[in-house]
Image (cartoon, rainbow, N blue to C red):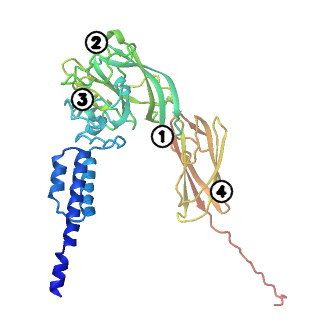
């Protein structure tokens, strides 16, 4: 049987079929070469593959040719996006424009955040003038002064002494010497002296000219690229006015004139000590003397008064409720309230009352079995006639004593003929 198989395998019919397959493969190879041109890569690919079934030869070559074609992207293939650079040259990524520099240090050369910011005229809330300078100031020079405050708009008024108000106002500055650079305006927001504590910090614009002036340009930048954005002042631009908006101040009336008092500090730099200024936080004095502290003039913002009422009793731990009425003033206030010896004092400010200066009265409704033994006020007035001045706080204290409970006395008379 083995001989039969071998003979069948080597028979003339098998050899004829094999020759036919060789011829077919050769024809296909010639056709492919003629169609695609003489390509060494394709010729090598065809010649290197083992011979066998025709379909098995065509499949690998088709795959190879497809791979070569995909190396050339079609016209509709979207372009691959460009890779982001390793370091973006955006100003916000380089430094925070509100970050305070080290005192008397030059700033890094970075682009300004926007063209609008180059006009300057910014206001932020941070440290006061001496805190920002990082050293003691004597503010003995008076090169620049606040000449006047005008066009005041009270955005949020004072409701009571110690409250805060929000103001818009126009400040006018005058120059008393040669040109000065980087004018800084520090306004106390905590009732302080504008040297330490909390202040609003503003700079004036550098453009348009007039009324503003830019004496620095890019000269303060070591690289000559960055523009100084803190406004300057010279003889040709003095006096110069600037509108300050959204300024927070504390409602303090120390002189009793009924108007708020606010301290402000001015800082500037002189030639030779001028540095790059791109933020109000950079507008510190060029020397300990190059500043001025003064009270803002003509600041007509009324400060209302305040009335506080406290309650004491004897015995101290008695829970009796006492009724009161606060009345009077130019607005004809009538406000009832109650107190006990254990409750917090009544405060007109906490009650939302705005008490303008005038005559007020506090009246207590004394309960039965109680006696009002004293009623005094801190300004020396009687609670029934309080003369409340602007910005004044008056505290009145009422003292009541519990009376002894009435006793019932029974008297019995006996006679001789009385029958019990």
Work out how far the residue at label 4 is from the one at label 3, CA to CA, in angstroms. 59 Å
Q: Earlier in the sequence, mark 4 or mark 1?
A: 1
Callout 4: helix, strand or loop? loop
Give me the C-alpha separation between circle 4 and circle 2: 69 Å
Task: Work out whether residue 302 can be spotted.
Answer: no
Mark number for residue 250? none
Which one is earlier in the sequence, the residue at label 1 or at label 2?
1
Between label 4 and label 1, give the one nearer the viewer: 1
What is the x, y in percent for residue 261?
Answer: 44, 30
| Residue identified by numbered label 2 | 177
Is any part of residue 31 visible from this angle? yes
* Earlier residue among tags 4 and 2: 2
Question: In x, y percent, where is residue 66?
Answer: 28, 52
Residue topped by disc 4: 366
Q: Identify the image quadrant of residue 332.
A: top right
In the displayed image of the protein, which residue is found farthest to the top? Answer: 236
Give the mark, 4 or 3, whose residue is nearer the N terminus. 3
Label 3 sits on a secondary structure element that is loop
Determine which residue is flagged by label 3.
Answer: 137
Q: Nearer the viewer, mark 3 or mark 2?
A: 2
Q: Nearer the viewer, residue 16 or 104?
A: 16
Image point (32%, 16%), residue name: 233
Q: Which residue is mark 1?
A: 163
């Amino acid at each position: 049987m083995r001989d039969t198989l071998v003979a069948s395998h080597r028979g003339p019919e098998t050899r004829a079929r094999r020759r036919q397959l060789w011829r077919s493969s050769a024809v296909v190879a010639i056709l492919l070469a003629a169609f695609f041109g003489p390509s060494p890569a394709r010729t090598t690919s065809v010649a290197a593959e083992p011979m066998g079934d025709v379909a098995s030869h065509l499949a690998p070559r088709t795959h190879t040719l497809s791979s070569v074609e995909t190396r050339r992207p079609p016209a509709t293939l979207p372009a691959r996006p460009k890779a982001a650079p390793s370091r973006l040259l955006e100003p916000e990524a380089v430094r925070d424009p509100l970050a305070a520099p080290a005192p008397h240090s030059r700033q890094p050369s970075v682009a300004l955040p926007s063209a609008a910011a180059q006009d300057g005229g910014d206001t932020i809330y941070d440290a006061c003038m001496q805190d920002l300078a990082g050293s003691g100031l004597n503010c003995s020079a008076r090169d620049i002064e606040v000449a006047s405050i005008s066009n005041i708009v009270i955005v949020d008024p004072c409701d009571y002494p110690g409250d805060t108000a929000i103001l818009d106002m126009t400040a006018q500055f005058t120059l008393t010497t040669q040109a000065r650079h980087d004018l800084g305006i520090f306004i106390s927001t905590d009732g302080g002296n504008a040297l330490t504590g909390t202040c609003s910090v503003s700079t004036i614009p550098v453009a348009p000219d007039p009324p503003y002036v830019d004496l620095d340009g890019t000269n303060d930048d070591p690289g000559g690229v960055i523009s100084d954005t803190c406004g300057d002042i010279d003889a040709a631009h003095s006096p110069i006015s600037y509108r300050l908006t959204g300024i927070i101040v504390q409602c303090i009336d120390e002189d009793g004139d009924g108007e708020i008092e606010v301290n402000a500090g001015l800082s500037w730099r002189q030639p030779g000590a001028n540095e790059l200024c791109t933020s109000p936080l950079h507008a510190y004095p060029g020397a300990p003397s190059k500043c001025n502290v003064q009270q803002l003039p003509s600041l007509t913002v009324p400060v209302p008064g305040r009335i506080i009422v406290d309650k004491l009793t004897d015995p101290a731990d008695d829970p009796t409720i006492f009724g009161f009425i606060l009345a009077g003033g130019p607005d004809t206030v009538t406000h009832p309230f109650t107190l006990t010896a254990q409750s917090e004092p009544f405060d007109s400010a906490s009650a939302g009352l705005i008490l303008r200066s005038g005559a007020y009265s506090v009246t207590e409704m004394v309960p039965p079995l109680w006696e009002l033994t004293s009623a005094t006020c801190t300004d020396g007035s009687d609670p029934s006639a309080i003369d409340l001045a602007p910005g004044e706080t008056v505290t009145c204290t009422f003292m009541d004593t519990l009376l002894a409970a009435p006793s019932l006395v029974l008297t019995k008379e006996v006679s001789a003929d009385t029958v019990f």
